[in-house]
Image (tube, rainbow, N blue to C red):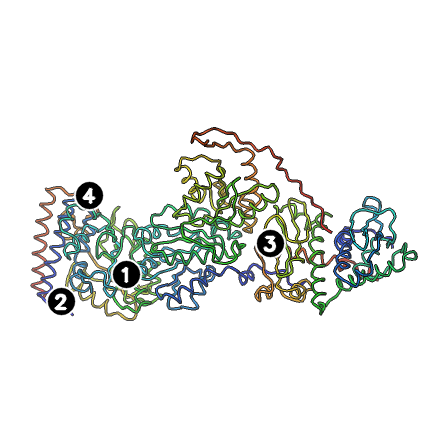
Amino acid sequence: MGGMNYTAVESTKMATAEIFGKTLVELGEKDPRVVALTADLAKSTKIGDFMKRFPERFFNVGIAEQNLFGVAAGMAKAGLIPFASTFSVFASMRATDQLHTDICYQNVNVKIIGTHGGTSFGQAGSTHHAIEDIAMVRSLVNLKVIVPADGYETANAVRAAYETEGPVYIRINRGFDQTVYTNEHYGFQLGKGVLMAEGDDVAIIANGSCVFQAVQAARALEHDYGIHARVINLHTIKPIDREIILQAVEETRRIITVEDHTVIGGLGTAVGEVILDSGHACAFKKLGLNDHFSAIGFHEDLMSINGIDTENIVKTAIDMIRHAHVVEIDADGRATRALKFDDRDFEAEIDWTDEV
Amino acid sequence: MGKKITKNDLYAARIFFNAALPLLRVVVESRQDLRRLFKGKSFVFQVTAPCVRVKGGKMATYFVVEDGKFTVKVEEIHPNPDIELAFLSLKDFILFFSGRGKPLPEIHGAAKHPLLFAALLRSLLVMANLLQATEAPKRLQDQVLLVKLYFYLLPAGISQLNKAGHEKIHQWALASPDRAYAFAVTGYPALNSYVRVKEGNSKAGRGEYPRCKPFLTLRFDSPLHALDILMGKGDMIDYIARQYLTVEGAPEFAAIIGDYLFTVGDYAKGLYLDWKETE
Amino acid sequence: MALSKAEWIELEHKASELRQLALDTCNWAGSAHMGGSLSSADFLTLLYHKYLNFDPKNCTDPKRDRCIVSKGHIGVILAALFAQLGLVDKEDLKTFNLTGSKLGMHLDSNKVKGLEASTGSLGHGSALALGDALAARVQNNPHKTWVLLGDGECDEGSVWEAAMATAHYKVTDLITVVDRNKAMIDGPTEDVLALEPFADKWRAFGFEVIEVDGHHMKKLSEAMEQAMAAKEKPVCIILDTIKGEGISFMAGDYKWHYGAMDSEKYEKATQDLKDYEAKRIARAEQEG
């Protein structure tokens, strides 16, 4: 058993999710207006493929994010379609004024690719964790915000961004996430959530790397307890898919949101706003970082520590099903307060004997 | 012999008794020539070695064969097996099964069941030849069988080391959330295996992990490429680049589980043993 | 082509008209950023009425030259300028800053035809201009891109990010112009955050620097022509100007970065601008 060990540096050679880079090249082949920019993160953000293929349409502005966005806005005004790529933490906060004024206010056709979203660049620590980026960019007028679940969805998001006039922010991860889809053809539509699993006991709404966790949680809930969880991949945070959220509220009455982000201002808040606005009641729990910075470490471990992994989603769902007070509407449309407790024993007996 | 039993001896013994020996069933079931030898036969075959640290004073694995069908029992002692290989010491047992020495056990019941004993010896020899081979077998069906043996042995070995309190592996298991590490070869679902770890507990399992998609899957594109890596012939990075191996999950964790596979493999080869002990 | 005497005098009239229109707008609005508007008036006049390849009737022509006014707070004189060019209805100037107006102190490029960028947050224009100039390269669409900066604005790091990139990419079709009126909201630039040695800073960033009297039409036109001919390095023109130039009680007073107007002040300012125009024309007659 040789060669099972390798360093983190070598691991960058093995990134499976370079789909973003490839998709951008594909758009570049198709449309000479597509240009790419970065701020000294060409390789890290996988925009390097484009650099190799179209050196004359690639611009590295150095470590200068304000300039990155300003130049991109200037190019868009001149009729180009710039894709500007840097880490999410910098894309959302290092040049927010340029994002606001040059890109969103002027409503120009700039596409921002924020990589290493959430805690996906775990070892780099909080200077490089983007746990507030969605809260920042979601509030910006004209900006559409997409948080794809995997590489295939990223390809779809990049194409949708290209096809949609105006500014778009796409938050992707480091490129080592588990894939959720097996190909790109599952009917991606900007602004429309994707139903990943059917179920009426509880609804788990997730985006980004948390979609994988949610899908696995639904399987585990079914396998361990016979609980049927609905899973919604809400890849587009803005514009938000009100319909799919409200249908879940109506049919499951229990909503859990899961995001690799602070629970202030991100996916959970966005979903909560839709529910609050609708006047419907449901049990509601946001999973994410609770107003604290994350520990340092491997992304998968951080997801566990921060309670956005499969295990904690399962626990949260059980807890909600056990304790939720559910207001129900009777046939005459009257609200009747029905306290629905589930007194099943959810302590799973796990047989730890090795199979021989 | 009578040498002091070390922690490493116990770890190795657990791997052999609880993870490796049970594979005899898999070997017999997979090979028509061996299966034929046990057709219609019913008996109990046991392997034991003395160990004061366990209940009953010895470690044991036994096979209940009913009408040619094997079932395996580990961590239990059968009171009166039909055939038994009783090693005189735990060390002898380890030397014998790691291939590092040939201290013969006491053999009970061979005279009474000479044909069955011969069939068992032959089966054990087939298994030993497979597991101790340094080159991959030529025939695809042998490759498939060997991958299966490795895929069943290694996760079980990790789980056994955890349960035995192996410092590094048990610490890792204690800190672990509920995660499954799986091993697969595309197109050969019968080879799937996994080890599930959660807060100090672990379970080695066979087949597809039933609960959800595993936390990490090492997926090979062919039995031969799996053997290249498992037998130390191929470079993992290179194989990933060539897409012979796909890591489904974060690569850092592939490195960790890879390290533990090594640990199990090293015990199975008796590498921890002092050269003097292998004389 | 150097300015002929007639052209010079013609431009002096245009500049005077622009200053008066800005003053009128300030008066209608009640207050405005007059100081920095007046210091830029001569440059804007020369650029828009002589050098910029820009047809107000076809202001989206991709081949046009662009001017990004990075010191976006001079919306009052830009609105006046665009009215002068026929891109803004002069009646609309009367609504400047008022509720529902399409004109406010920082103009919106999505509402004002011909305005290249919405600016106001300082330090943005250089990057926008660089983006346009680089796009010109990608699209093989050569044209000049001008960017007008305030001097206080150069406190912003983003100005220097863009400067570095402009020199790195050798963008000589981008001409940077700094209105060095030496004053900002809180006081003289050298008191608030010293800029000097200012020209040396630009040189150190890889620019050819042309320092020129920003209120001398002829010298300014020569500087602009020199900048437009540059091929080796990008050019930065530093306009030596006076904040509030042309109105006696504003000139040189940093407090007139932004100020309120009443009828008395308006009368006085109008008279001042008339006197100033006479002085400027006399100089053109004499030196032209």
CA neighbours of label 4 inside 10 A, class few (<14), some (14 to 19), many (20+): some
- Amino acid type of the residue that numbered disc 1 sits on in the rendered structure: Ala
Q: Which residue is mark 2?
A: C3
Q: Is residue B104 left or right of residue A12?
A: right
Q: Which residue is mark 4?
A: C98
Q: Chain of mark 4?
A: C
Residue A285 place in picture, x, y as percent: 49, 38
CA neighbours of label 2 inside 10 A, class few (<14), some (14 to 19), many (20+): some
Q: Residue furthest front?
A: A331
Q: Is residue B149 above or below residue A224?
A: below
Q: Is residue B108 left or right of residue B63?
A: right
Residue C288 place in picture, x, y as percent: 9, 66
Q: Which residue is mark 3?
A: B216
Residue B271 visible? The answer is no
Of tags 2 and 4, the one toward the viewer is 4
Q: Which residue is mark 1?
A: C199
Secondary structure at numbered mark 2 = loop
Q: Is residue A344 above or below residue A297?
A: above
Q: Is residue B218 left or right of residue B268?
A: left
Gap between marks 1 and 3 measured at Cα = 60 Å
**Residue A163 quadrant:** bottom left
